[in-house]
Image (cartoon, rainbow, N blue to C red):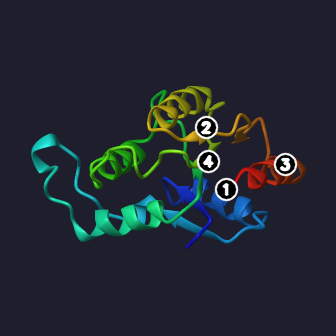
Amino acid sequence: MSKILIISATKGNNLSLAKKIGNYVSKDNKIISLEDFEMPLYVPKTETIKTDIVKSLSKIFIQSKGFIFCAPEYNGGSPPILTNAITWLSVSTDNWRSTFVNKKAIIATHSGGAGFKFLTSFRSQLEHLGTIVYPRNIVVNKEKKFSDQSVIDILNEFEKLI
């Protein structure tokens, strides 16, 4: 069981960010990219089609105690691949919140801009699902470079919660 699951929505800059963050996580952790889990587009009539991929991803999330989500801002919000995965995870168990409830999370982004709209909207979504979201974010963009010390400080405090 991974104590901390580091999820990259994409295989580009955010997977690189996930790996950099992973270098500083002292607890048992696992890094995944949602691009490796090719799930169908969720539409309500397909809800009963729980593919092996959805079951596999759900098991990884359920067994984790905390999450670090790395995703870009996409059209002022979450990237579609992340929204689709969250939706599938919410219908993969008997209780739609059970994959997320009382788990801890950090939100990180490597975006073209500040990523503020993603950070805000995704925080709201995770909190709605019952996740306790750490108040500090990890943000990388063309104006703000990756800060080893800042990430270390954030992770040291976050890991105390796990």
Structural crowding at the residue carrying mark 3, measured as other residues with C-alpha within 10 Å and reported as few (<14), some (14–19) or many (≥20): few
Badge 2 or badge 3: first in the primary sequence = 2
Task: Kindly report the distance in space between the C-alpha atoms of the residues bearing marks 1 and 4.
Answer: 19 Å
Measure the alpha-carbon separation of dots 2 and 3.
17 Å
Of mark 2 and mark 4, the one earlier in the sequence is 4
Callout 3 secondary element: loop
User: Which residue corresponds to mark 2?
Assistant: 112
Question: Disc 4 or 3, which lies upstream in sequence?
Answer: 4
Report the Cα–Cα distance between label 2 and label 4: 26 Å
Q: Are marks 2 and 3 in contact (CB under 8 Å)?
A: no
The residue carrying mark 1 is: 17
- Which kind of residue does numbered mark 4 sit on? Lys
Quarter location, residue 162: bottom right
Residue 73 vs residue 134: left or right?
A: left
What residue is pinned by disc 4? 104
Q: Find residue 28 and report its horizontal and vertical position in percent.
A: 68, 71
Q: Nearer the viewer, residue 12 or 62?
A: 62
User: Left or right: 66 with respect to 79?
Assistant: right
79 versus 118 height, above or below: below
Q: CA distance from mark 4 to mark 3?
A: 22 Å
Image position, residue 138 (x, y; %): 72, 43
